[in-house]
Image (cartoon, rainbow, N blue to C red):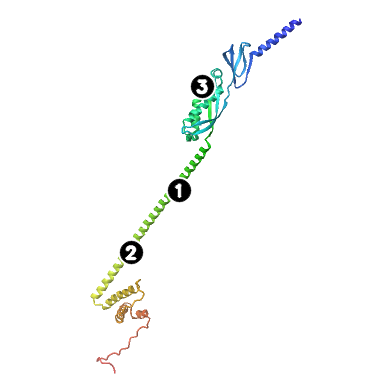
Amino acid sequence: MLGFDVFLLVALVLVLLVVAAGIKMVPQGFNYTVERFGRYTRTLVPGLGVIVPFIDRVGHKQNMMEQLIDVPSQEVISRDNAIVTVDGVVFYQVLDAPKASYEVADLQLAILNLAMTNIRTVMGSMDLDQLLSQRDEINHRLLSVVDAATTPWGVKVTRIEIKDINPPRDLVEAMGRQMKAERDKRAAILEAEGMRQSEILKAEGEKQSVVLEAEGRREAAFRDAEAREREAEAEAKATEMVSRAIATGDIQAINYFVADKYVDALKAVATAPNQRVVMIPVEATATIGALTGIAEIARETFGDGAVDRTLGRAPARSASVPRAGGDGTAPS
C-alpha cells in the first residue's frame, strides 16, 4: 500500500507539472508566439493561454505597446557641404507579432539603422538653411520612408523626431554675423523708408503751403484790383464833377482840384525813402491861393461859421453898412 501511495503522489506531481507547463499567462500589452517542434503555429493574446506541454513552446514575447528608440548623434554633410551633428528619436509599435518575430532578426537594431541611414540621406539632400528651418519637412520625409520600409516587419512607425541639429562653432559664428548683417540691412532699409516718407510728407506740406500762398496772393490781387477799380471809378467821377464845374465856370472847383494834386505831389516827395532833406522852392502865394480856394468851396458848402471853427478862429462879423437914402446918397 505504501508503494501505491507513493506512485499516486508522483503521478499527481507529474500531472501538476504537465498542467503548469501547458498553461501560459500572457500579460496585457504582450503577444506570445507558439512554436511546435520549432515551427510557428499560433499567437497567444493577453490572458490565460494553453499549449501542449513538451510539444509546444513559447517562441517570442513581443511587446505590442508603442516603444521608443533613441537615435544617437551622427554627423551629416548637407548639400552645401556643411557638417552638422544630428540626433533624434523613433516611436514605433508592433502590429503583427509573428512578422516582428520571424521577418527580421533584431527588430530594434534594424529600425535604428534604417532611421540613421535615412536621416543622412534626407538631410544630405538639403541645404543648411533648410535643415535649420524645415524640421517638420524633414520629420515628415523620414517618417514616410522608414514606415514604408518597416511595414513588411509588422511594425508601424508612428513618429520620427529630430532632436538637435548642431552646426560647427565657426559656422554658428558665421551665421550670427550673417543674421546681424541681415538685421542691420533691414534696419537701414526701414530707416531709408522712413526718411523717404518724411521727405514726401515734407514736400507735400511745402506744396500745399505754396498752393495756399498762391491762393492768398490771388485773393489779395483780386481785392487790390477791385480796390483800384473802385478808386478809379471814384477818380473818374470826381474828374467828371470837376469838368462839369469848369464847364459852368466855377473857378473854385478848379482851385480845389489843383490844390489837391499839389498837396499829393508834395506828400510823395516828402515821404520818398531815398530822401532825408527836401529843399524845394515853393511859391507861397500859389499855395495860399489854392488853400483859399478850398476854403471858399467849404464856405459855400457848409457855411462861414463851420469853416471858421475848422480853421480855429472866431467867426467874422459883418460890418454895418449904412443904407443909402432914397436918392442913393450916403448919410452924412
Q: CA distance from mark 1 to mark 2?
A: 48 Å
* Residue at position x 53%, y 32% in the image: 85
- At x 64%, y 14%, the residue is 23
Amino acid type at mark 1? Glu
Say whether marks 2 and 3 touch (CB < 8 Å).
no
Q: What's the residue type where badge 3 is placed?
A: Thr
Mark closer to the chain start, 3 or 1: 3
Residue holding disc 2: 224
Q: How many numbered callouts?
A: 3
Q: Look at mark 3 in the image and give the residue it sits on.
A: 151
Q: Nearer the viewer, residue 173 or 40?
A: 173
Quadrant, the N terminus: top right
- Residue 191 disc label: 1
**Is mark 3 in CB contact (under 8 Å) with mark 1?**
no
Q: Quadrant of residue 211?
A: bottom left
**Regarding mark 2 in the picture, which secondary structure is present there?**
helix
- Three-letter residue code for mark 2: Asp
Q: Picture coordinates of residue 115 (x, y %)?
A: 52, 26
Marks 2, 3: nearer the viewer: 3
